[in-house]
Image: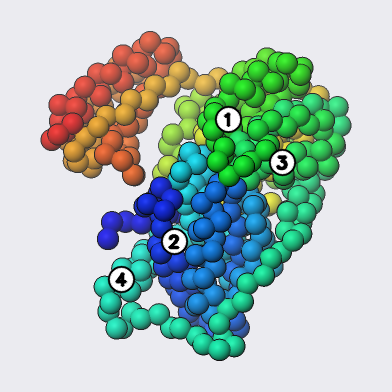
Amino acid sequence: MARLFGTDGVRGRANADLTPELAMSVALAAAHVLVESDRSHQPLAVVGRDPRASGEMLEAAVVAGLTSAGANVVRVGVLPTPGVAFLVAEVKADLGVMLSASHNPMPDNGIKLFAAGGHKLPDETEAEIEAAITAAATGDPASAWRRPTGANIGRAHDLLDGADAYVAHLVGSIDQPLAGLKVVVDCANGAAAEVAPVAYREAGAEVIAIHAAPDGRNINENCGSTHLEQVKAAVLEHGAHLGLAHDGDADRCLAVTADGDLIDGDQIMAILALAMRDAGTLHDNTLVATVMSNLGLKQAMQAEGITLLETKVGDRYVLEELRRGGFTLGGEQSGHLVMPAFATTGDGVLTGLHLMARMAATGKSLAELASVMTPLPQVMINVVVGDRAAAASHDLVQEAVAKAEADLAGTGRVLLRPSGTEPLVRVMVEAATAEFAHDVAERVAAVVRVASPTG
């Protein structure tokens, strides 16, 4: 069986790659791996989803898998991924399941798993779950699932006030009223549609919500954090102080200034790092980001006396580093920001609240706050290859990267990264000018194409 888990759970085209049978197997295996060692009580699981149509089908399969393993299930309905993680901890559940393909188009869906406390699973635990599914699929008698019967079969019920508890938690995370701020929020016709506008209004902001009418089919459709044109236009039309854009499951947030300029995750991290430093809550004056964050972020943090720690790409690796060092802020350029004091995973609505709280506390515009960081022009070229690892490590490619770094002479950088899910090597270059970055990236990409067996 091909590897199931990618950088953020199991994902694929619903009812084709990600079938109800597979969803049931994943749920069943997760229940056994995560709670088999502790049978002192009947396990409890929280299950939520984004509003895409296939979520209803997959939810039924996941609930069947969990209850057949003897776990009781609390269905929380449509809720952001961080909301599900919050409720896992809130109700002291043993595990959680979120059905979402995040920013992917509607035909896709995915399964994200949480352990007790609402934490994402480490690689080793995902590997155990995959091994259990593979063993069961081969018919190995030793791997047969333990199947409770009678009163030991799990039960399922709905939690009707889960969203209210989550919103109260979000609003309670800031102590600065947002009165006087007008914000446009693009809910991506996704899981943020109900939660985000309510949270921002309860915090005191004037809210104009767009793409907040999910019908199961329009999630992420030309809207949200991957399509910013309409939120930019709405900010200008309504004279708003800023715009916020979430993705389908609301675990990320990008922003737009009053003039319609993009503020990405790196710039938001810079703003919040300074806010937390000033408040004395930035542990060890350290920010955690991935290797894909712009070099401008590192330069800005150095100038402010803040250490930037870099991890592999993926918010799970940011989370692991945050937990390892007890750090209090981390994230990705894509808008996944994690504040462990308030969330166990990336939370777009939480990010939006704290960004606006900084604006309200300082009286500064978003553009003024973001000016602390000057992003370097960044160019990314995806090169199709036959063998990702072999192409990236080829001697000719390594020589080309070394030559490019010498040409940049410390004014930029080159990052070569094999894709985790596609037959691609990503060539990313940052330089003082976009033209120079593009020239260097093209030269390195050309060598990757030559060095690849089939690229």
Q: Answer whether labels 3 and 2 touch (C-beta < 8 Å).
A: no
Task: For label 4, count other residues whose C-alpha is less than 10 Å away and answer few (under 14), some (14-19) or many (20+).
Answer: few
Q: Quadrant of residue 19?
A: bottom left
Q: Which residue is mark 2?
A: 20
Secondary structure beneath label 1: loop
Q: CA distance from mark 1 to mark 4?
A: 39 Å
State the residue position of label 3.
Answer: 196
| SS of the residue under disc 2 | helix
In this view of the protein, can residue 322 be seen by the observer? no
Q: Residue at x 19, y 41 (%)?
A: 387
Which one is earlier in the sequence, the residue at label 2 or at label 4?
A: 2
Examine the rendering and report whether any part of residue 312 can be seen. yes
Query: Of callouts 1 and 4, which one flags the residue occurring earlier in the amino acid sequence?
Result: 4
| Residue 65 at x, y percent in the picture | 49, 71
Left or right: where does residue 379 sit relative to residue 182? left
Relative side of 202 to 298, left or right? right
Q: Which residue position is annotated with label 4? A: 137
Of residues 318 and 402, the one nearer the viewer is 318
Q: Is residue 201 left or right of residue 300?
A: right
Mark 1 lies on residue: 223
In the image, residue 147 above or below residue 274: below
What amino acid type should be assigned to the residue bearing mark 2?
A: Pro
Amino acid at the residue labelled 1: Cys
